[in-house]
């Protein structure tokens, strides 16, 4: 049984890897063709265009792993059936339960790789993408320069506006409103032409301060000013990267910051639960693969069952997206619309396998 277990695990991992590699290559080529056909980003050279597409590969891997896991497992199991290998496995004492236990090892490996890519690789590649600007004549160091109003950040009794931020956390165009804790009235306005961030200290330069009193305004100028805030480089990175590119721990830290400032965190908690659901989906899609392969038919209609299995995986994705939209509008708990599709397809797979095993 040990030799058989190694054989099934190895073949399944090869099948999943081959399917995932094929999907990633197709996405890479499609993205490259789209960029080249646009023509507007070729000023910096073909190499930079290819590099940008290559840095997107981890994100594609993360998104394509569930479908690749199901499709690759189906192809391998269908081959076992068509070559009568499964008949030999069953004659040696293997049941569907034993097969599920073996596939759970494959599922654990695939989920672990997905976790590593999502939590370690993607954040680094996305930060690299932030520092690459392929537009002609642009500042290669700028990672954030948004609308005229810039980025707005709430820091307890402060509201901070930043026009531009570089990758080494150099700031420009800084505007800070300090509020009275009692009535939330503006008590001080700070303007600075630039500054830098180090931990939770901001070193501002060329500073103009306006103190607001009930009967007068007092203005002063300072060449430098040190400002202690809760906005550290990690918070800035979370703000600029977007919730989908943050790790689970970064999301937790940013949610804590938002909760301390009394802001809505529903969107970020939804992303947290989506990350958990993604890993569970990868694990379960491999386990339910035997549901869609008719082992007793010895390969008859194998292509049909592979198609049905892959279609079920796509259907699970669209069901998840639909429930996510409905749940977000209705303000359901994120765990609800994350796991409903998974539970439904798991129950159907269990019922189908249990009835097949009885026969």
Image (tube, grey):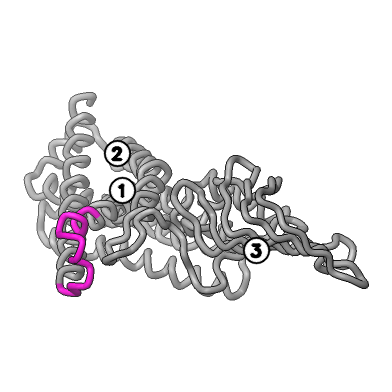
Q: CA distance from mark 3 to mark 1?
A: 52 Å
Residue indicated by mark 1: 286
Q: CA distance from mark 3 to mark 2?
A: 53 Å
Name the residue: 40% across, 60% down.
Answer: 345
Q: Percent x, y for residue 293?
A: 21, 54
Q: Quadrant of residue 149?
A: bottom right
Q: Secondary structure at mark 2?
A: helix
Which label lies toward us, 3 or 1? 3
Specify the segment rendered in magenta: 37-51
Q: Secondary structure at mark 3?
A: strand
Residue indicated by mark 3: 175
Q: Secondary structure at mark 1?
A: helix
Looking at the picture, does residue 177 appear above or below residue 167?
A: below
Look at the image and tell me in which quarter the N terminus lies: top left
Residue 293 visible to an observer of this rendering = no
Report if residue 40 lies within the magenta region.
yes
Identify the mark nearer the N-term, 2 or 1: 2
């Amino acid at each position: 049984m040990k030799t058989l277990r190694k054989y099934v695990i190895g073949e399944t991992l090869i099948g999943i890897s081959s399917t995932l590699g094929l999907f990633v290559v197709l996405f890479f080529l499609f993205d490259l063709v789209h960029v080249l056909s646009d023509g507007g980003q070729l000023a910096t050279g073909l190499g930079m265009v290819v590099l940008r597409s290559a840095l997107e590969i981890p994100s594609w891997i993360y998104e394509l792993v569930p479908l690749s896991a199901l499709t690759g497992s189906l192809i391998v199991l269908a081959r076992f059936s068509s070559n009568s290998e499964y008949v030999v496995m069953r004659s040696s004492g293997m049941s569907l339960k034993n097969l599920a236990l073996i596939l759970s090892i494959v599922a654990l490996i695939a989920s672990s790789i997905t976790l590593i890519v999502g939590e370690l690789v993607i954040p680094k590649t996305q930060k690299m993408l932030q520092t690459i600007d392929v537009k002609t004549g642009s500042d290669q160091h700028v990672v954030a320069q948004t609308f005229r109003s810039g980025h707005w950040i709430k820091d307890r009794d402060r509201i901070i506006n930043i026009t531009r931020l570089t990758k080494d956390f150099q700031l420009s165009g800084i505007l800070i409103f300090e509020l009275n804790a009692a009535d939330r009235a503006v008590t001080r306005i700070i303007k600075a032409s630039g500054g830098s961030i180090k931990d939770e200290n901001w070193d501002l330069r060329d500073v103009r301060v306006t103190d607001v009193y009930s009967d007068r305004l007092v203005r002063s100028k300072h060449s430098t000013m040190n400002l202690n805030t809760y906005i550290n480089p990690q918070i800035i990175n979370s703000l600029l990267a977007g919730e989908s590119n943050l790790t689970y721990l970064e999301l937790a830290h940013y949610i804590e910051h938002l909760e301390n400032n009394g802001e809505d965190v529903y969107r970020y908690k939804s992303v947290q639960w989506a990350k958990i659901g993604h890993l569970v989906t990868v694990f379960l899609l491999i386990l339910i693969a035997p549901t869609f392969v008719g082992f007793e038919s010895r390969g008859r209609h194998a292509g049909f069952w592979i198609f049905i299995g892959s279609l079920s995986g796509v259907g699970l994705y669209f069901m998840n997206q639909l429930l996510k939209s409905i749940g977000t509008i209705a303000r359901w708990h994120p765990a609800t619309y994350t796991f409903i599709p998974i539970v439904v397809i798991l129950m159907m797979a269990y019922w189908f396998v249990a009835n097949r095993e009885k026969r």
